[in-house]
Amino acid sequence: MSEYKSKILVIEDEQDIREGIVSLLEDQFTVSTAASGLSGLKEAIRNKPDLIVLDLNLPDFDGYQVCKSLREEADFKTIPIIILTAFNESDDRVRAFDTGADDYLAKPFSNAELISRINRKLNVVKDMF
Ligand code: CA
């Protein structure tokens, strides 16, 4: 088996949440981070992650704009994007999916659920038995 670790980019402006996600994921994945929409887009282009965890409420571009911009790039047409947000109305979820998100997780989220959703998107099947 190769030891390739999937690359995950976490775009989240709240430091506590960002660091929490990094410590949650760093054993299993290669994690990079960005604290704003623009720096997230730049990091995505530079680093070509395998999956992006994207906060909606960011200081510059919001997550919808980031998602839409990524989907306009050939390299990011199909990359899994999981939206994290404190907004959890049906309209917000619809808008997230309409702009190209693959999944949506409301804050506060459970760590186990985030990991499980990431693994599903990366087609990791855990050997549980
Ligand atoms: Ca935020």
Image (cartoon, rainbow, N blue to C red):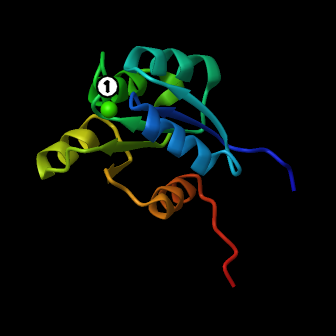
Q: Can residue 60 be seen in this view?
A: yes
Q: Where is residue 86 in the image (x, y as percent from the top left)?
A: 25, 45
Please report the residue visible at 39 percent of the width from the left and 32 percent of the height from the top.
14
Give the residue type that dot 1 points to: Leu
**Taking 111 as reference, is 57 above or below it?**
above
Residue that extends furthest to the front in the rendered view of this protein: 16
Taking the spot 50% from the left edge, 34% from the top edge, the residue there is: 10
Foreground pick, 109 / 127? 109
Name the secondary structure under disc 1.
loop
Quarter holding the C terminus? bottom right
Q: Ligand 1 lies in which image quarter?
A: top left
Ligand 1 under 8 Å from disc 1 Cβ: yes
The N terminus sits in image quarter: bottom right
* Image position, residue 33 (x, y; %): 55, 28
User: In the rendered image, which residue does mark 1 sit on?
Assistant: 58
The image quarter containing residue 26 is top right
Up-down relation of residue 86 to residue 41 (above or below): below
Residue 36 in percent (x, y) is at 40, 20
Which residue shows up at 40% across the image and 36% down it?
Answer: 54
Q: For this rendering, which residue is in front, 127 or 87? A: 87
